[in-house]
Image (cartoon, grey):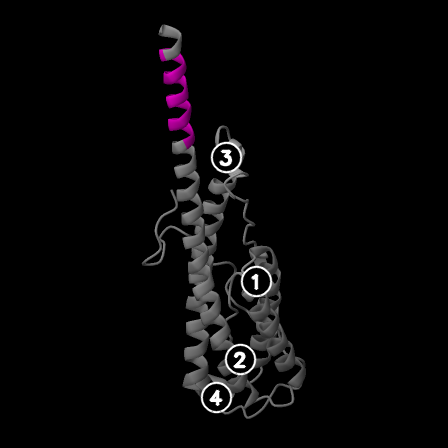
Amino acid sequence: MVVLIIVIVIVVLLALGLWAAYNGLVKKRNRTQEAWSEIDVELKRRHDLIPNLVSTVQGYAAHEQGTFEAVTQARANAVTAGATGDPGQIAPAENALSGALRSLFAVAENYPQLRAVESFLQLQETLTATEDKIEFARRYYNTSARDYNIGLQTFPRNLIAGPFGFKAVAFFATDEDDRAVPQVNFSGSGPGAAGPAPSGPPLAGGPEGLPPAATAPEGLPPAG
């Protein structure tokens, strides 16, 4: 009788442990999915801004067709990758799009007329704010993904991860140089300038990196 009671107690404790482990994985997976949804929203907003930005700059630099086509193609690739929902495919496509945008802003820097175009300045500010939100969301997602992946590998969660369909998720990695939107610098160009400088477009002198992640944007829950 005593042996039976001991066996029952052990079985109950094991069941409770597995139940707690399962619930823990569910919470970590839900947090990771929530974090990814934040990134997805901001990436879509970024994609929506780019056609207007290209159109605005194109009105002043129509002969820079190669740059505009590169940005348009990079955006299309990023949208296609975004449809997969796989961070491993989305991150490289978004990095390529960031590189194309840097080239676009380098071209814009050669046209001081754009500083009088309010729509261009507003688009640049909105895109910069969007990039900041993407970076905050990316950090939160990667922290959540790390915690979730570690949970899948630790005992006793690793015993139930496979049978219950829990799978590791990829990180959303970006290149260090792709985390900021270059700011167009018109210094040295007179207000009456009417066309591009004779030399090739200079490199955009944007800020290096993004603001420190000391304060998360409103609506983004802290990673736990």
Which residue lies at the image location 35% right of the left edge and 58% below the top edge?
Answer: 217
Nearest the camera: 107 or 160? 160
**Residue that numbered label 1 is attached to:** 84
Closer to the chain start, of discs 4 and 1, is 1
Circles 4 and 3: CB distance less than 8 Å?
A: no
Circles 1 and 3: CB distance less than 8 Å?
A: no
**Quick one: label 4, few (<14), some, or many (20+) residues within 10 Å?**
few
Q: Is residue 190 visible?
A: no
Instruction: Residue 57: give x, y in percent of width and height.
Output: 54, 85
Amino acid type assigned to the residue bearing label 4 in the image: Pro
The span shown in magenta is: 5-18
Residue extending furthest toward the left: 218
Determine the CA span between mark 4 and mark 1: 46 Å
Q: In which quarter of the image is residue 103?
A: bottom right
**Residue that numbered label 4 is attached to:** 191
**Residue that numbered label 2 is attached to:** 188
Q: In this view, does 157 lie above or below 186?
A: above
Q: In which quarter of the image is the C terminus?
A: top left
**Residue that numbered label 3 is attached to:** 160
Please tell me whether mark 1 or mark 3 is closer to you in this view.
3
Determine the CA span between mark 1 and mark 3: 27 Å
Amino acid type assigned to the residue bearing label 3 in the image: Ile
Please tell me whether mark 4 or mark 3 is closer to you in this view.
3
Nearest the camera: 111 or 21? 21
Determine the CA span between mark 4 and mark 3: 67 Å
Secondary structure at numbered mark 3: helix
